[in-house]
Amino acid sequence: MDLSTAMWTAVVVGAAAVYWFVWMMGAAEVKGKRAVNLKMGSIAKDKVQDKYKQYWSFFLRSKEDIVAASDDDKVPAFVDTFYNLVTDIYEWGWGQSFHFSPSLPGLSHREATRKHEERAADLIAARPGQRIVDVGCGVGGPMRAIASHSGAHVVGITINEYQVGRASAHNRKADLDGLCEVVCGNFLEMPFPDASFDGAYSIEATCHAPCLEDVYREIFRVLKPGALYVSYEWVTTGLYRPDDPRHVETIRGIERGDALPGLRAQNEVAAIARQAGFEVVEERDLALPPAEPWWTRLQMGRFAYWRNHLLVSVLAALRIAPKGVVDVHEMLYETARHLSDGGETGIFTPMHMILCRKPLLINQ
Ligand SMILES: C=C(CC[C@@H](C)[C@H]1CC[C@H]2C3=CC[C@H]4[C@H](C)[C@@H](O)CC[C@]4(C)[C@H]3CC[C@]12C)C(C)C
Ligand SMILES: C[S@@+](CC[C@H](N)C(=O)[O-])C[C@H]1O[C@@H](n2cnc3c(N)ncnc32)[C@H](O)[C@@H]1O
């Protein structure tokens, strides 16, 4: 082989390797978002790093510090920034459903995710002709699963405008835009009339509210009397010891890497729901045995994280992705470690299920 043939062979093989690395290895589990298309929501490319720093210094504080600085009301704006920073990375590396689910032997992650979503629809007995609200809908993975499983009309609300665009595009692509609708708004002040929904659900979303009672009250307001509401809550369990520094570090790690103004304790949730006016029908940690661990999906991807880290670093160096994407990716990697510690030690669950009913007769 002469020199020029060898050089051309090297160029072709190199290009094929780069193509394979970026497009095949870096492809989203659920196709639709690829590494080369990573944006940071509606943040301009040159502002990503600043926005990330602002986010980080806000959530680096504990709940007590946020409250002491009277910064509670700034939480939704920082949660919005968070989702500008992470939405594309989540979609690329996890899929269109931004939540966990128990592993189900013999089923893929995607199938297990779907079962967890359909379970929510079944719990509130969603059916055709009903209007259901999805409180904190992300890019609509659960909404599409629930609408097609139940035949109900689902209206999702998210604080993040970029997610509204993504969710609406996915709805159209899935031919579900007749049954699924997305609005941008704050779930603490929803742009919906009183008693306008037949049911509601929230999947791993209300943990972003500084005060759980406020969001539960708002959901209560928009529900018709007799309607059901189910939530999958992020909480610390009874195994959490606030005097154990390793427990505290795990929980603080989960809070700062997931835009949470302070995790609540599992045994507080039902009392809060009652305080908001609901009857509590059922309450259960869906992560408890016989459920299989939800956190193994995070651990099994160690190699994938390193591959992804390399990929985002290359894309940022080539200025295809914004510079700050590497910081955000690193933050998520750390967060994954804390989440899986939380799962393994049992001090944290992302799926404390609470099923509530708005009473038919309300005592004033
Ligand atoms: C409910 C919430 C989000 C839960 C999960 C969907 C996300 C929590 C942590 C995320 C991730 C961590 C590691 C990332 C990895 C480094 C990257 O290469 C690919 C994406 C990750 C796997 C990413 C995916 C989504 C999470 C699992 C919170 C915010 C209330
Ligand atoms: C972890 S994601 C879960 C999304 C979706 N439930 C799912 O499982 O795919 C949390 C969602 O809550 C939304 N959210 C957080 N705080 C909010 C607020 N104050 N008002 C409306 N949406 C909010 C975020 O924008 C995001 O869409």
Image (tube, grey):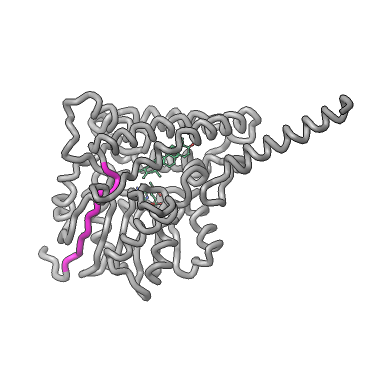
Report if residue 7 is visible in the image.
yes
Q: How many marks?
A: 0
Q: Is residue 250 left or right of residue 164?
A: left
> Residue at 25% across / 25% down in the picture?
246
Q: Is residue 322 left or right of residue 85?
A: right
> Residue at 30% across / 45% down in the picture?
350
Residue furthest bottom as drawn: 129
Q: Nearer the viewer, residue 294 or 353?
A: 294
Q: Nearer the viewer, residue 229 or 148?
A: 148
Residue 47 drawn at (x, y percent): 54, 32
Q: Quadrant of residue 319?
A: top right
Residue 8 drawn at (x, y percent): 83, 32
Q: Nearer the viewer, residue 352 or 188?
A: 352
Q: Nearer the viewer, residue 308 or 107?
A: 107
Q: Quadrant of residue 252?
A: top left
Report if residue 194 is visible in the image.
no
- Is 354 within the magenta? yes
Q: Quadrant of residue 241?
A: top left
Q: Which residues are magenta?
A: 349-359
In this rendering, is residue 231 above or below 86? below
In this rendering, is residue 311 above or below 186? above
